[in-house]
Amino acid sequence: MPEQGQGKGKGKGKVTRQDAAAVWHCWNQMEVYLQQMFTVIDDAEGVEMTDQDGKVYLDANSSLWNVNIGHRNQKVIHAITEQFQRLDHASLFLSTNSPAVHLAKKLKEMTGDRYGHVFYTNSGSEATDTAIKIARQYFYNRGETERYKVISLHRGYHGSTLGAISACGIPYDKRAFGPLMPGFFQAVVPDPFDAPEGMTADEWAEVCLEELRLLIEQEGPETVSAFIAEPVQGSEGVCVIPDSYWRGVRELCDRTGILWISDEIATGFGRTGRMFAAEHSGIWPDLMLLAKGITSGYLPLGAVLVPKIVFDEFLGSVKLEREFVHGFTTSGHPVACAAALANIEVIEEEGLVANSAAAGSYLLEGMLALKERFPSIVDVQGKGLLLGIRLAKWTGKSPMTAEWPPAMLAMNFLAKRGLITHAAGTHAVVLAPSLTFTAEHCDRVLQAFAQVLTTLEKIWGREKYVST
């Protein structure tokens, strides 16, 4: 890769002008985007990305929390190329294909044969919609037609399709799209940061669990089809939910018959230091959502893992009309599934799950040390290589601080120092690098944070912080 400052720079203006004229970017205020003419990434390898000017960035975001094995892995690229030469597409509506079959078998093995079948999607958002429809039709087929409601957690994120945002617990993501799908409700998230003074994380989790019990009782358990939640929240800042909460959720769902859907779209495939986040507690959900790390983003793919007891409710003669009325043209795409199989081989053969745990622990320890130095950091949480740094609010009135919330300001300052991160909401910066990160990479992240926070605290003023 070119060294910083040694890039080509050819066509920069032309490409950015074409981009501004034609591409509508995800989650961007395009008026601001058009003024800034954002960076064109020309190539990437390992944990680094290079822009059109040759500036090298350390990718501490793994593109969007998904390039788990790092960029340009030749084993996965070879598997994709080889599969394209053999079979470019075969619809699961009409037939099957070997990569889809082998990947389903592999996913079943990886989860201890807890899930009898895999339903393929093309993204995490589609996986969420699919799981919600599975839950609703599961109860419909059982004659429990009143079970349509879905409960999720405040600040939870499950995708951007209409069904997914109905389940989301982030008001900003939802307010422009109403009326949303009916029957969606949110419960309090057991974020340790929110625990009242003097209360432990587990005690707070029990309070939140009781609120969930009361919500189910209020709505009527006979009307609730599913509870959906992420084992580690990330989109509004990282929240590591205590294991005690999941034990309560498992007992509550078993007692009421509600299906527990675990959104492992961001946490699966080694992100949290285990292959799946459920392994930390040993408490497994009824349905599991996968995407992102399943192919490390090399090609689009998502999946819903479904237990036999749920799958069996969709069986019967044609005249009974019990089949799952759902699907996508490219479900189980052979090239995407081949990419996933190769990606999983890389994760297993290179010991990336163990490395995620070790590097994540090192990075978390370093961030907690920075928290002691910088009052602008009010909370640090993480599991494996998914870390959130929550920044304080400030009361300064400079034009810069008035225009930009702390997370976005920090993210931009970090990018200028060659570090790509993610602004989660307005007050949290999230780190989710490739699982190939080393201690040296972690040190570069910590150094960049220390430099940027030193600068920002001069701007904000130490005496003006208030907790978020």
Image: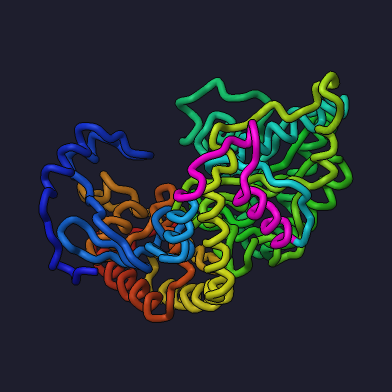
Residue at left offset 79%, top offset 47%: 307
Q: Residue furthest front?
A: 86
Image quarter for residue 257?
Answer: top right
Residue 199 visible in the picture: no
Residue at left offset 54%, top offset 54%: 338
Image quarter for residue 22?
Answer: top left
Residue 253 visible in the picture: yes
Residue 80 in the image, given as x and y percentages of width and height: 46, 54
Residue 162 in the image, given as x and y percentages of width and height: 54, 29
Residue 297 in the image, given as x and y percentages of width and height: 46, 53
Q: Is residue 183 left or right of residue 437?
A: right
Residue sitting nearer the eye, 354 or 119 = 119
Q: Is residue 414 left or right of residue 263?
A: left
In the displayed structure, 468 sits above or below 25; it is below
Quadrant showing the N terminus? bottom left
Residue sitting nearer the eye, 64 or 254 = 64
Residue at left offset 50%, top offset 36%: 160
Residue 101 covered by magenta stretch: yes
Residue 276 in the image, given as x and y percentages of width and height: 64, 61
Q: Is residue 193 left or right of residue 29?
A: right
- Magenta range: 84-111
Residue sitting nearer the eye, 306 or 220 = 306
